[in-house]
Image: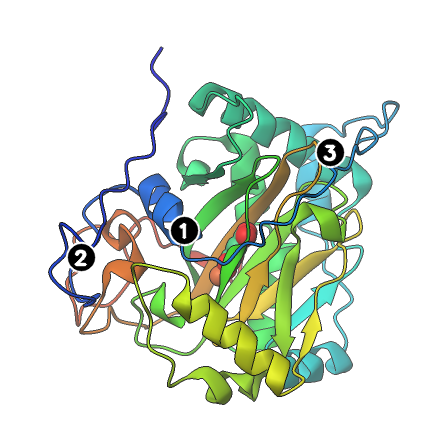
Amino acid sequence: MKKKSDQYSVNLSEKNSVNNSIDQNWEQDNQSWWDWYLTLAENSNKKYKSIKLNPLLVKDIVIPSFNNIKKELSTPYDLKESHIDLFNKNGFIKLTNVLSIGAVSMLRKEILFLLNKEFNLNKSNRFLSMEMMWTENKIIREYVFSSRISKIAANLLKVKRLRLYHDNILTKESGCGRTPWHCDDDHFPLDTQDVITVWIPAQFTPREMGPLSFAKPLNVYDMVSKIKFNKFNTSYDKQVNKIFKEKNVLIEDGPFEIGEVSFHHNFSFHTAGKNKTNKLRVALANTFFADGARVNNNPTMVSGDWKKFIPGVKPGGIVATKLNPICWPSKK
Ligand SMILES: O=C(O)CCC(=O)C(=O)O
Ligand SMILES: [Fe+2]
């Protein structure tokens, strides 16, 4: 069977693009979008020794039953006022014990199964993306519509009702380079600022594996808001990095324990390191937004194939298709 996008299919080059404008729509699929996007990150040429990780999942973990997973994913998390305050100050928060080790093992097992079906995992050091898996996979659906998780997201944003923008399985093969510095605001063509992404790593994720990393506090956004995005090269990433260094911006780039999950606002600046280990870095990233939002008036190529996530809705239209169900309050 032919597997998805075996070849890099980015055909964006200065030759076939007249200028640096990003106003045009992204015409290819989301995998090609990520192939392009990762080329915008600066990577050091320094040689490094690949780190051999022990099996990420302890052999004798019993994978829970489907019913137990359902139960766990609908049990409320003990979110504190201090968490909400921190999220509002920093634009992100990392919470431990959102998932049990069993739930993380089940997620990784299912994602590896899906990745193997979809891609040739041939050590190509690529960034792999698989989105909207909730529409076809019963296990992923539980993690996307988990009321434990969507209630945290709604409380952090302080909104009453949340809808799904998309789910996204984001994998870095061994040797896959950095994710460029960015905030997600341009990625989602939504006219609201109440957008949050839940990044759920499906293993212990040490620094060397490329965990999601955040600049803080949230308003460091202002320091870099004037930098011009460049679709051809790493200059945007480099400049953001330079300014953050010059201004001694604090970066949270620590590991994620098993079961630890991050939540970030669409203005939070973040990046992720290179995967210097011999194992896949796998995460499920689910994005939610406040009910009532509309498609903004100028989606750009940075929004990727957004029409896949909001089919049939034009700029100005309310985002409430059957692919954007209400996730909080939860029916589960
Ligand atoms: O997984 C990554 O490396 C990047 C993910 C990201 O930028 C996001 O989820 O907003
Ligand atoms: Fe992002």
| Three-letter code for the amino acid on which mark 1 is drawn | Thr
Based on the displayed image, in which of its 4 quarters is residue 136 positioned? top left
| Earlier-in-chain disc, 2 versus 1 | 2
Label 2 to label 1: alpha-carbon separation? 19 Å
- Where 77 falls versus 240 (above or below)? above
| Residue 247 % position (x, y) | 62, 88
Can residue 160 be seen here? The reply is no
Residue closer to the observer: 241 or 30: 241
Residue 255 image-quadrant placement: bottom right
* Three-letter amino acid code of the residue under disc 2: Asn
Q: Nearer the viewer, residue 224 or 202?
A: 224
| Res. 105 mark | 3
Residue shown at 74% from the left, 39% from the top: 49
Which circle's residue, 1 or 3, is located before the other in the chain? 1
Q: Residues within 10 Å of mark 1 (few under 14, many from 20)?
A: some
| Position of residue 277 measured from the top left corner of the image (x, y, whole percent) | 71, 38
Q: Which mark is residue 331?
A: none
Q: CA distance from mark 1 to mark 3?
A: 31 Å
For residue 25, which numbered disc appears in the image? 2
Q: Along the horizontal axis of the image, is 53 left or right of 168?
A: right
* Disc 2 + disc 1, Cβ < 8 Å: no
Q: Check the picture and name the quadrant holding the N terminus.
A: top left
